[in-house]
Amino acid sequence: MLTTLKRLLGSERRARPMPQASQALPGGGLAAAQADDIQRFIDAARRADEHHQAPWVLRDEARVETLRRALEFTLHRGLWLQREAQGVGHWQGRLLSLRHADGPPLGMLLACRPDDEAAWQLRFFYIEPEWQGSGHGARLLMAARRSLSGSPLQARLPVSCKAAIHSLEAAGFQRMHTDATQVASFEAPAEWH
């Protein structure tokens, strides 16, 4: 029990402090999400799930609430709760939003990784419907590459997500392979600034 507690506390100490919502970039840009943004993220994930394009199945309220709690934990602690073979791992997590000044988010992304040495995994990203088709997807992903500099970024998504794939490629991600279930893997090399 003591070993488990030390391991959990140790993983929390390794997590980097999250920028506060008040540290949003002047004039807008990519910044830590705000608590009010979580519902927008969940709504986008539900829209994606309706088309079988989300990394989560969100067809019942219990699963939605589990995702909400995990996102809140990520927002406040900088940790993403990741299911692992022996239970739940505490990965580094970032919930980021792209916005103009103080307005609502144009889009958001969730990135996580098991430790400082690993690549960031983009679990889910989206652009609000009214801003789609304006290049904001590529802008969100390029900003994420700058924000998460020093580490490669990886993404996996169904090949049916044509707009998301176009945004990834425009932001410098390369398609690595497509598996038998028609899920494509992408990677962007580490970017230093």
Image (cartoon, rainbow, N blue to C red):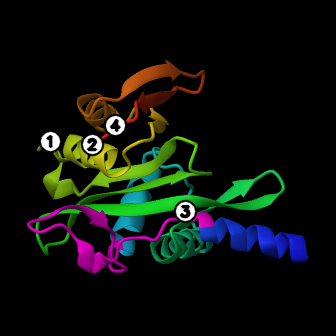
Magenta span covers which residues?
A: 14-37
Above or below: residue 89 compared with residue 134? below
Per the model, the C-alpha gap separating discs 1 and 4 is: 20 Å
Q: Is 131 on the left-hand or right-hand side of 95?
A: left
Which residue is disc 2 drawn over? 193
SS assignment for the magenta stretch, majority = loop
Amino acid type shown at disc 1: Gly
Mark 2 element type: loop
Disc nearer the start of the sequence (1/4): 1
Residue 149 is drawn in which quadrant? top left
Disc nearer the start of the sequence (4/3): 3
Per the model, the C-alpha gap separating discs 4 and 3 is: 37 Å
Above or below: residue 131 compared with residue 32? above
Which residue is disc 3 drawn over? 59
Q: Is 99 on the left-hand or right-hand side of 124?
A: left
**Closer mark to the observer between disc 4 and disc 3:** 4
